Image (tube, helix red, strand yellow):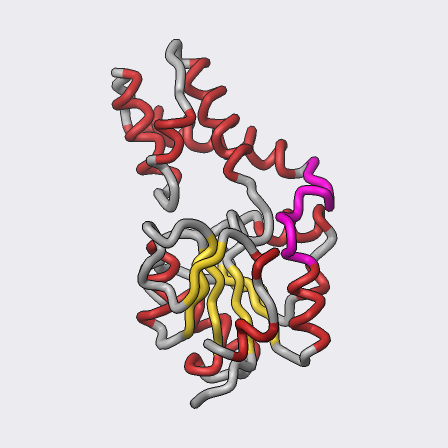
Amino acid sequence: MNTIKACIFDLDGVIVDTAVYHYKAWKRLANSLGFDFTAHENEQLKGVSRVRSLQLILGWGGVVKTQAEQDVLATQKNEWYVDMISHMQPNEILPGAKKFLDQCRSAGLKIALGSASKNSMMILEKVGLVNYFDAIIDGNKVSKAKPDPEVFLKGAEAVGIPPGECVVFEDAIAGIEAAIAGGMKTVGIGSPEVLGDADLVLSGLSEMTMKKLAQL
């Protein structure tokens, strides 16, 4: 049996929740085009790329745009989003996340980030967590999206730990699939109905303990 020597964390929905800012930025964009965008529709964008998200939103609004116009709109949305997250505070860290990171560090475990976000470094700096991570692998360092395991394999490589001795914390199905494909243990953050393929499913890092980690 392999002992866990590294924890690799997705960012959004695991350590912080920036989904609210994506929602506000998309809603602002939809409103600027003359229609509304609901929280229910927003749920359907989880784990979906910015380009595809825009196409879905335009479809819901019955709005047709050329590729060039879509590029401008996607850029505008991202500028609004980046402006919002640039004002994030440490109190936006999700419950239990900082405490568990402290426990991982005390136990001598390697800590890596494996996130599709290209803004992860700024978010971690704003909430005061950047120094916890031995490696940060984000959207600027990978070419393949989850469920491809690239982001997690690069994280394991960066901290010098074999994939079989890493555990990934994820809130999305594609992320759990990516970690499994990479040969890693998995902890799903969210609902067992959605993340049933994970080795362990918790509602948040506030439920995670060193004992549970040792049992994976």
User: Can residue 76 be seen?
Assistant: no
Please report the residue visible at 71 percent of the width from the left and 46 percent of the height from the top: 126
Above or below, 38 relative to 145? above
Asked if the stretch drawn in magenta spans residue 96, the answer is yes
188 to the left or right of 173? right
Above or below, 59 relative to 86? above
Which stretch did the figure color magenta?
87-98
In the rendered image, residue 70, in percent from the top left (x then y), is placed at 35, 28
Instruction: Residue 181: name its quadrant.
Output: bottom left
User: Can residue 46 be seen?
Assistant: yes
Please report the residue visible at 54 percent of the width from the left and 74 percent of the height from the top: 213
Above or below, 173 relative to 32? below
In the rendered image, residue 178, in percent from the top left (x then y), is placed at 35, 64
Question: How many labels, in total?
Answer: 0
Please report the residue visible at 48 percent of the width from the left and 30 percent of the height from the top: 23
Please report the residue visible at 66 percent of the width from the left and 48 percent of the height from the top: 93
In this view, which residue lies farthest toward the top?
34
Instruction: Residue 45: name its quadrant.
Output: top left
Asked if the stretch drawn in magenta spans residue 162, the answer is no
In the rendered image, residue 137, in percent from the top left (x then y), is placed at 52, 63
Q: Nearer the viewer, residue 32 or 98?
A: 98
Above or below, 17 relative to 173? above
In the rendered image, residue 183, in percent from the top left (x then y), is placed at 36, 77
Instruction: Residue 92: name its quadrant.
Output: top right
Q: Nearer the viewer, residue 92 or 210?
A: 210
Q: Quadrant of the N terminus?
A: bottom left
